[in-house]
Image (cartoon, rainbow, N blue to C red):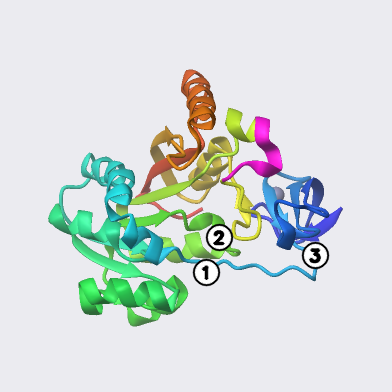
Amino acid sequence: MIKSDCLCQKNSLFQPKIVYENETVFRNFNSVTIGRCINCGLLKTVLQPKNKFNPQTTHADFYEEKHFLFVSLLQPIVDQIKKYKKTGLVLDVGCSSGILLELLKKEGFDIYGIEPNKKAFLISQKKFGGKIFNGYLSEYIKKKPRGFDVIIYNHVLEHIDKVVEEINLIKKVLKPGGLLVIGVPNINNIIFFLRQKYWEYLVALEHIWHFSKKYLVNFLNKKGFNVSEVSFSNDRRPDYPILKRGYFYFLSIINKLFNTGELMLIVAQLKYDKHD
Ligand SMILES: [Zn+2]
């Protein structure tokens, strides 16, 4: 058992579930362990002292190079938001090079972004100037920003160690009735079931938390949000050889049959009475 903080309680105990040892695939992962909280069942990367997290990894250059591809991946988020809000102030936390913000701006939203990685921040700042903040929400909040109608965490929440504290900060800057949009990998799908430690979205040295739909929806409900919608998608893996692509396509069909997917997009509304 490994002692570590969980979302359910501090100093919880985690039972090792996936252990990377003497790997040829993940050579730098030596002794990285993903454990299951014995209290609530959540999976967490619980590190041995010799490993180091790299939560701020950015692929900003890659996003810009493949701008067209990422527009098609991010457009569904915009479409989802537009079902609930037509205008208003939007904050994208971990906005990277700002591709999602470009799309939202085109739709008429008043956009703001936060990005801790300096390189990604600079690309975003070039596009949007003073609307982008270099750092974390805990620092940004000290600038007393106005209340937001929409806050987005796309592939960000799973990297944040202190998620409970982060949610409490979100509730301070999101208007009552405002939208919280979260995109994260979902462990409850056939591809993780089959591939386990080799599932591409586990990224055990960057992702601290490994959520399932059920867990995250319950957690948000407990924290004062109403989850209005969860949608799923699967990675097409366009760079894989054709046979492998076919195999993953087949698995994605199975995911769809079971109404799940590798990636999930959660839309939640902050309750008007937002106290726990
Ligand atoms: Zn727990």
Q: Secondary structure at mark 1?
A: loop
- Position above or below: 247 against 110: above
Q: Is residue 30 magenta?
A: no
Image quadrant assignment for residue 48: bottom right
Whole-percent x, y for residue 172 in the image: 39, 66
Q: Residue furthest right?
A: 1
Are there few (<14), some (14-19), or many (20+) residues within 10 Å of tag 1?
A: some
- Position above or below: 57 against 8: below
Circle 1 is placed at which residue position? 56
Residue at x 68%, y 56% (from the top left corner): 6
Image quadrant assignment for residue 67: bottom left
Q: Nearer the viewer, residue 28 or 154?
A: 28
Whole-percent x, y for residue 78 in the image: 25, 47
Magenta span:
194-200
Q: Secondary structure at mark 3?
A: loop
Left/right placement of residue 31 relative to residue 42 reads right
Circle 2 is placed at which residue position? 159
Q: Nearer the viewer, residue 128 or 153?
A: 128
Please identify the dominant SS of the magenta region. helix
Going by the numbered disc 3, the residue's amino acid type is: Gln
Residue at x 40%, y 76% (from the top left corner): 119
Circle 3 is placed at which residue position? 48
Going by the numbered disc 1, the residue's amino acid type is: Gln
* Mark 1 C-beta closer than 8 Å to ligand 1: no
**Res. 141 visible in picture:** no
Left/right placement of residue 267 relative to residue 24 reads left
